[in-house]
Image (cartoon, rainbow, N blue to C red):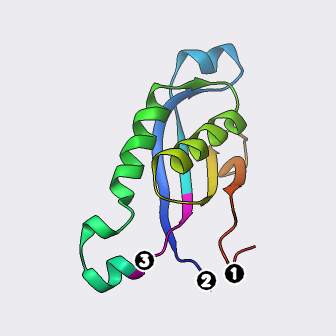
Amino acid sequence: MTTDLVFIEDLRIQTVIGVFDWEREITQTVSLDLQMAFSISTAAASDDIADTLDYKAVSKRLIQFVESSEFQLVEALAEHCAHIVLEEFPVCWVHLKLSKPGAVRGSSAVGVIIERGAAPAGQG
């Protein structure tokens, strides 16, 4: 049996993040890419939004959290975002990529990729 994935791609959010003094005085953009294990079969059969994972609600919750946060490390921010998704939404697994665009000269972005929860069948 395989599990479906619902995704959110390039969710850009302004936040205070970084270890340097100047980074603590400004906001910077972070980008989130998420894949969340969620069976779409009920929603596909009913064509009813009540039966699906509301990716708008997930996005709004993460925007609210990230905008109000002041982490130093992308690792800590990513871990907290994954925890929110797993605790507040009906998913058992999340693959989360958190990028910090422009953080390293010559690179489009740097960041971390984490997976939390039980890997969905066929993914792990």
Residue at left 42%, top 77%? 40
The disc, 2 or 3, on the residue closer to the chain's N-terminal end is 2
**Helix or strand or loop: what does disc 1 sit on?**
loop
Q: In this figure, which residue is indicated by the disc labeled 2?
A: 2
Residue with the mark numbered 3: 40
Left or right of 49 on screen, residue 34: right
Tell me the quadrant of the picture where the C terminus can be found. bottom right
Q: Are marks 1 and 2 in contact (CB under 8 Å)?
A: yes
| Viewer-proximal residue among 62 and 19 | 62
Residue 24, image x, y percentages: 60, 17
Residue type beneath disc 1 = Gly
Location of mark 1 (residue): 122
Query: Judging from the image, what secondary structure is the residue with disc 2 in?
Result: loop
Query: Is 5 included in the stretch rendered in magenta?
Result: no
* Mark 1 vs mark 2, CA separation in Å: 5 Å
The span picked out in magenta is 34-41
- Check the picture and name the quadrant holding the N terminus: bottom right
Identify which residue, 93 or 20, lies in the foreground.
93
Amino acid at the residue labelled 2:
Thr
- Tag 3, which secondary structure? loop
As drawn, 122 above or below 53: below
| Residue 98 visible at all | yes
Q: Looking at the picture, how far across and down is residue 107, in whole percent?
A: 71, 50
